Image (cartoon, rainbow, N blue to C red):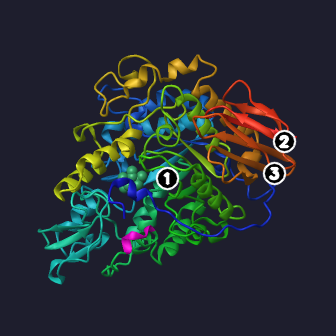
Amino acid sequence: MNKSFPGFFLLAILISCNNQPEPTVQDTDPNRTWWKEAVIYQIYPRSFKDTDGDGVGDLRGIIEKLDYIQSLGVNMVWLNPIYSSPNADNGYDISDYRGIMDEFGTMEDFDEMLKGMHDRGIKFVMDVVVNHSSDEHEWFRQSRSSRDNPYRDYYHWWPAEKGKPPYRWSYFDAEGNAWQYDSLTDAYYLHYFAEKQPDLKWENPKVRQEVYDIMKFWADKGVDGFRLDAFQFVAKDTTFPKLPEGYEKDVKNVIKHYGMGPNLHDYLREMNREVLSQYDVFAVSEGAGSTFEDAHNLVDADRNELQMAYHFEGMSVGNSLEGYALSEFKEVYTRWDSAFAQEGWLSIFLANHDVPRMVSKFGNDSPEFRAPSSKMLNTFILSMRGTPYCYYGDELGMTNISFDSIGQYRDIAAINGYKKVASAGGDVEQYLKELKFLSRDNGRTPMQWDGSEHAGFTAGTPWLPVNPNYTQINVQAQESDPNSCLNYFRKMVRLRKDNPVLVYGGYELLLPEHEQVYAYTRTLGEAKMLVLLNFSAENARIELPAGLEAGEVLINNYDAVEAAGSEVKLLPYQAVICGLK
Ligand code: NOJ
């Protein structure tokens, strides 16, 4: 397994495609639903807008920017965790599931924010982090206090008299060991993530009931969806057998041995019965298992489990400092689309808070090509089947900050990863080079609102520096430019919302081997669209397959496109969607 943090997200998976006819969607079609038609905007609340000058974004900041969010045309917002937390992992370590983090505000702020969204026709997705809690959660305080405490069985403990527990890898531990010895009760507890994130024991029905009660608490408040963090890991083999030699070389084995336990589907059906089916809400799993079958078993409608999942195979493309082959990118997205053409539903995204900025990774963040390539990538996300997740700042073409020294990082994954490499005598220079490109902090720098100090994000000192390019890349500058990334994003969102073919239509890949252009059609009944995306910094020329000719241009990130018969010429990073003649 890749031992740097991004390895966690490189969970690749395989299976064959199927070739059955595409479904059609009419207004009465029961497959039509709001969460499939939504465009989700993901906000990292720490970095969106600070209103009290402490350098950390807050809920009042989101309230202040609700009109901006609405102006994007998006109709759902997912916020990373906003619960009370000591912030070992920026909120993914929760100490009270019914409280709001002090830095972010109060429950009154939350209620006002939610109402503000609903008043604007925007739905809201809550992050649910229940593979683990914080070690400062009352459950864990009790659990660790004695072996016979009623909460002992809320977590995974290994008594020291049984010897050392079989090794388990931890994503954030500075020594890479998921078992932490606790002298108080002479036992080890399990933490797949940081030492301060002990794993909850889902095998205990009381734990599951606690989780459902928490979800009901938020559903009663009116939240519309749940994003289930690290969910494929909740069901474990609690005998913790010794793992076979070399298992970690295949990521599929990692998922199999660390999660996706046989009870997962029972738990999900229980959650569906107790919570999801009782409200008009949807739930999306972070992670989709290690096969298409796993993914289908999570999301197919007749399973009564979840509604959506996101897979990580797309994120595993482009992690090399040498770039990536477009044919590989196309192959991954096409294979996943085919596998879900008949049943099940997935998400489409190119960035989130765990990966680099989309334009720096998949596009070209040089001053010359940043704008066209970021518009091109947004055209991709918003023209594929699946629910698009658009990460804050990507509508502007925000880029990686690219830190040089370890002291600049704030992310526990980067800091502890560095310690691990250093203490093993590894190549820290190489590690820093990879971090500079792949670190999670790249995607977490504050939102760039305007050209004033700290980009208008805070009146204080930002918790993570603002990218110095904010003087050129910011909302204010882009509002007044009709050709800006921001205004292009709005146009593209509108195109998707006006055309169900972009949501439900069948997808067909053209020119699979072409290393510059990603071309595909979307078809729903009579509606047909042709999507042409030049992923390269050079001019490109394609010959459309026999019978296809580009028609009326519906969106274009340049002023014109050169097309004659079946021949189309595209400028660097040009993106065009047109009808078909
Ligand atoms: C996945 C989240 O996306 C990531 O940010 C977090 O660090 C881990 N889960 C642990 O909760």
Residue at 50%, 53% in the rendered image: 317
How far across and down, in percent of the image, does residue 532 sit?
Answer: 70, 41
Foreground disc of the pair 3, 2: 2
Instruction: Say which of 533 and 416 sits in front.
Output: 533
Q: Amino acid at mark 1?
A: Met
How far across and down, in percent of the image, does residue 264 sit?
Answer: 48, 73
Alpha-carbon neighbours of circle 1 within 10 Å: few (<14), some, or many (≥20)?
Answer: many
476 drawn magenta: no
Comes first in the chain, label 3 or label 2: 3
Magenta segment boundaries in residue numbering:
247-251
The residue pinned by badge 2 equals 549
How far across and down, in percent of the image, does residue 440 sit?
Answer: 37, 45
Residues at marks 3 and 2, CA–CA distance in whole angstroms: 18 Å
The residue pinned by badge 3 equals 524
Residue at 59%, 71% in the rendered image: 297
- Is 553 on the left or on the right of 413, as rendered? right
Comes first in the chain, label 1 or label 3: 1
- Is 83 on the left or on the right of 32, as rendered? left
The residue pinned by badge 1 equals 315
Main secondary structure along the magenta-highlighted residues:
helix
Foreground disc of the pair 1, 3: 1
Circles 1 and 2, Cβ within 8 Å, touching? The answer is no
Disc 1 residue: CB within 8 Å of ligand 1: no
Circles 3 and 2, Cβ within 8 Å, touching? The answer is no
- Is 163 on the left or on the right of 445, as rendered? left
